[in-house]
Amino acid sequence: MSVHHRIGILALLSWYLMVPPSIGSDQIDVNAPLSHWKIQATFDTVARCKDQIQQQLDSLNDKSRAASQLDRSRYLNAHCVADDDLRLKAK
């Protein structure tokens, strides 16, 4: 496989910013299968995805008490996941 072909394949990869699902109104389930997590946004690079997680955390910290603990927990446990990750297809 040529370098140009591999670069083309990598360019097709998207990254999902994913947060764990809620349990009730005040907890998250970090142990839920990844296929149950929620996609918050899609990015073309993992770096942009990770930057967005940090921006969300910074924003929630700036809001202090106005932001819920649930939102903070979601982004503290958020992951950037490639769109071809097999765990997304597991049920």
Image: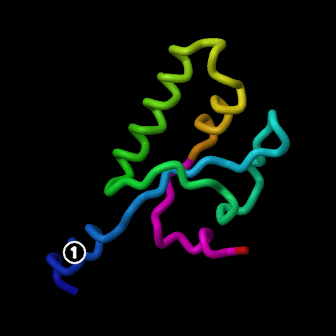
Location of residue 87 (image quadrant): bottom right
Residue drawn at the location 68% of the way across and 48% of the way down: 20
Colour approach in the figure? rainbow
Depth check, front residue: 27 or 7? 27
Q: Residue 81 at x, y = what percent?
A: 50, 58
Residue drawn at the location 68% of the way across and 24% of the way down: 68
Badge 1 density bin: few <14, some 14–19, many ≥20, Cα 10 Å: few
Horizontally, is 2 left or right of 26 in the view? left
Q: Residue 89 at x, y = what percent?
A: 62, 75
Q: Residue 29 at x, y = what percent?
A: 77, 48
The answer to whether residue 61 is above or below residue 90 is above
Horizontally, is 56 left or right of 1 in the view? right
- Report the residue that reaches farthest toward the bottom: 1
Depth check, front residue: 60 or 6? 60
The reply to whether the magenta stretch includes residue 88 is yes
Q: Residue 91 at x, y = what percent?
A: 73, 74
Q: What element carries label 1?
A: helix
Depth check, front residue: 51 or 37? 37
Residue drawn at the location 57% of the way across and 74% of the way down: 86
Q: In which quarter of the image is the N terminus?
A: bottom left
- Report the residue that reaches farthest toward the right: 24
Residue drawn at the location 17% of the way across and 76% of the way down: 3
The answer to whether residue 61 is above or below residue 21 is above
Horizontally, is 33 left or right of 62 in the view? right
The answer to whether residue 9 is above or below residue 20 is below
Q: What stretch is highlighted in magenta?
A: 79-90
Total marks placed:
1
Q: Name the residue under label 1.
A: 8
**What's the amino acid at mark 1?**
Gly
Depth check, front residue: 42 or 7? 42
Horizontally, is 2 left or right of 87 in the view? left
